[in-house]
Image (cartoon, coloured by chain):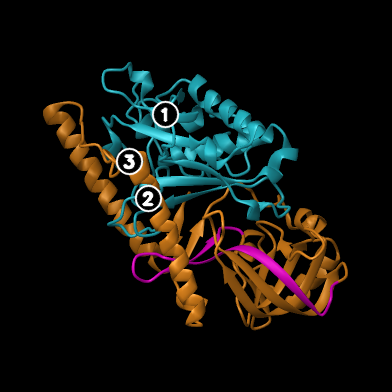
Amino acid sequence: VLFLALVGVGLPARTVLAGHTFNGGDCWRGYTPLLCRTNWAGQNKIEYIYNIDQMNNTTLHNYLTTAMQNWTNFSGPQWFSYSSANNASYDYMKLDPNIKYNQRLPNAYNWNCVPGACPDTAASDNYMWSETYTTTDNLPYGSQNVSIFAHELGHVLGLDVHTSAGSAIMNDGSTLQGPTFVDIGRLPPCSGDSTNMGTRCIYNWTS
Amino acid sequence: MKFHARSYHLLVAAVTIGVAAAALATTLALAQDTGPVKNTPHDPMAGLSPAQREAIVASAHARNDEFLRNFVAQHRDPRSLPVGWLDSYAAPPASLTAATADADLIVHGRVQNVTFERNPSGGMPISTAQVQVLDTVKGHAAQRISVGQLGGPVAKGDGGALVQFRGSELILPGDEVVLLLKQVGAGEPFRTVFGAGTYLVRNGVIAGENAEHYGVSGQPLQWFVNKLSAGG
């Protein structure tokens, strides 16, 4: 079983989801939500974001399911669903046993890749997928793993770390379990300060 | 994830803002003239089979491994690489006091050598430093300890980069350091307290990313050691 995020032609507007960081990975700061919006508007594609073969752990799987559901349940363009496709992967959730090292909070990181190398920030390169690394050593932290996955899924959606005031899953170390209006962004999309821009801006969501 | 090349930071920022401004201007212009913008989807993997995508992912990992292997074989200096920063989920401790309390061991020392290994998972390289302990501020340490971090040389275009986590600056050979460390397990390298574990000593004063975060950059070494001894 594979998770995927689906963007489909002719589907209701709310089925829009996901993409990758673009030209440097920053879709939150420095007005780059507008850049992502420009490049991602109207995309219709399938994004495979979870390969169960890469993380064969039922408990983590369930936490990830909850995190995805929390993004789906929040009003906005993002939507996650299952697919029966096999052995297909684009964005990955993976295990990295080397991040077990007793860090202050359970840790995870995104590692974006291009054909030549990962990561690569040359302006002429495009990020082609992201690999989210976490670890089974986070299991004792229980439901905070939902926060970890929800945060990393925000990166997959194109959001960077959120540094402005306000409660957001994209704050480093957030203990929220899903997005807030700060992560989704204000209306109209792309209005106001760039630090208030969220998925509404990136995906041109006007509702 | 956010990745910055330190040496290109200003240039990239300027280019990014410029491109973004141009894109915005274009977007607004098009929106006025032709209605909602529908750009060509940016999906460089569109049309590829899952196996073809997997092959691209594997080739990127292989290139990173090859770069690291050559880098080590040629005894290249990691300081010669531009630094790239990665964000992670973890937030730094709320205060230096909290970081000090969290540390099992605090030492003043000098980095003697550092080895880099590929990460079997495909993620960040693994760095292991040998540190000569000059002074122990908290806990008990041998004269020489191992300190593990994630990060190291990776392929980046033609030149490579030294990738490391924001908040966990890599320590390199020759560095004089103050380290806040966690004991992971018997026989395993110590780990820096994430976001607060690495302080460089340059010309007798404290420096580095963590030092700036906690407002101790530029303070004398002894002042900093005394502060840590008092609980941060």
- At horizontal 82% and vertical 80% (from top left) the residue drawn is B143
Chain drawn in cyan: A
Dot 3 falls on a residue whose secondary structure is helix
Please report the bounds of the magenta region as a residue range.
B141-167
Q: Please report, as a chain letter, where disc 2 is located.
A: B
The span from disc 3 to disc 2 (Cα, nearest Å) is 26 Å
- At horizontal 31% and vertical 17% (from top left) the residue drawn is A11
The tint of chain B in the picture is orange
Position of A48 with respect to A181 (left or right) is left
Amino acid type of disc 1? Ala
Q: Is residue A67 above or below residue A19?
A: above
**Front-most of residues A76 and B201:** A76
Which image quadrant is residue A167 in?
top right
Q: Is residue A151 magenta?
A: no
Q: Please report, as a chain letter, where disc 3 is located.
A: A
Q: In the rendered image, which residue does mark 2 sit on?
A: B55
Amino acid type of disc 3? Cys
- At horizontal 49% and vertical 72% (from top left) the residue drawn is B69
Is residue A175 visible in this depiction of the protein?
Answer: no
> How many badges with numbers are in the image?
3
Specify the farthest residue to the left: B33
**Front-most of residues B64 and A74:** B64
- Residue B86 place in picture, x, y as percent: 51, 55
Amino acid type of disc 2? Ala
Q: In the rendered image, which residue does mark 3 sit on?
A: A36
Which image quadrant is residue A187 in?
top left
- Residue B15 place in picture, x, y as percent: 29, 57
